[in-house]
């Protein structure tokens, strides 16, 4: 039905809306693709940061040198003080045993705060999306990879942006929470 897997999103959405079961052969559903999940998790973290799984997914995407053990230490701190993972990351300097990783975590939380500031300044959601791709280095990493797989991922990210733009055009008051 379509030439590239990036084009599957529109079919998937229409089938989902009509409750028609479907199966994708030779690929994965649009929203199940790594790059799409990654960017959606970034948007979730910017929106409210309460989704610990989303934060855990993107804290080291692209690679920032924040390992699993560092994230586990932050999670233990969050559990101790009954807070979310991202909130605990904002207090990385207070997390016991984090040491050098604290500065890397601070770099990540600064990015999230910068994105939140952009949102408060009233940027379009599509502009925020572009900023996330650029400032995290996500897009640059795909370009540098220079493979067919990376090109397909870039096409998927372009398709996700198209969805965001369409939402902005159709929604009366587009918000990240409603996206």
Image: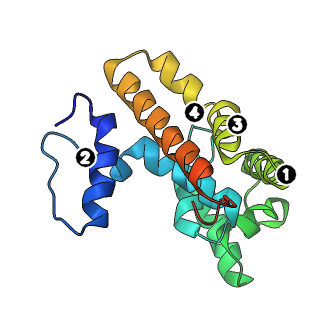
Q: Position of residue 3 (x, y in %)?
A: 22, 28
Crowding at mark 1 (Cα within 10 Å: few <14, some 14-19, many 20+): few
Which is in the foreground here, disc 4 or disc 2? 2
Count of number-bearing discs: 4
Query: First in sequence: mark 1 or mark 2?
Result: 2
Residue 117 - label: 1
Residue under label 3, please give it: 131
Identify whether 21 is placed above or below 144: below
Q: Provide the secondary structure element on which disc 4 rests.
A: helix
Q: Residue at x 57, y 33 (%)?
A: 138
User: Do we see residue 45 in this rendering?
Assistant: yes
Q: Image check: 35 left or right of 55?
A: left
Query: First in sequence: mark 1 or mark 4?
Result: 1
In this view, the residue in front, 114 or 158, is 158
Residue under label 2, please give it: 28
Query: First in sequence: mark 4 or mark 3?
Result: 3
Query: First in sequence: mark 4 or mark 2?
Result: 2
Query: First in sequence: mark 3 or mark 2?
Result: 2
Residue 138 - label: 4
């Amino acid at each position: 039905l379509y030439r590239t897997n990036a084009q599957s999103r529109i079919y998937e959405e229409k089938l989902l809306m009509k409750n028609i079961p479907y199966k994708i052969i030779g690929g994965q559903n649009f929203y199940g693709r790594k790059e799409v999940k990654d960017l959606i998790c970034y948007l979730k973290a910017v929106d409210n940061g309460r989704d610990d799984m989303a934060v855990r997914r993107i804290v080291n995407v692209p690679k920032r040198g924040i390992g699993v053990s560092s994230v586990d230490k932050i999670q233990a701190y969050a559990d101790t003080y009954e807070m979310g993972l991202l909130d605990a990351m904002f207090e990385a300097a207070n997390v016991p045993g984090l040491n050098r990783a604290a500065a890397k975590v601070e770099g990540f939380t600064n990015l999230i705060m910068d994105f939140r500031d952009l949102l408060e300044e009233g940027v379009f959601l599509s502009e925020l999306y572009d900023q996330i791709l650029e400032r995290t280095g996500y897009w640059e990493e795909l370009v540098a990879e220079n493979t067919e797989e990376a090109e397909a991922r870039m096409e998927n990210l372009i398709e996700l942006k198209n969805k965001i733009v369409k939402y902005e055009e159709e929604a009366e008051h587009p918000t990240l929470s409603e996206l």
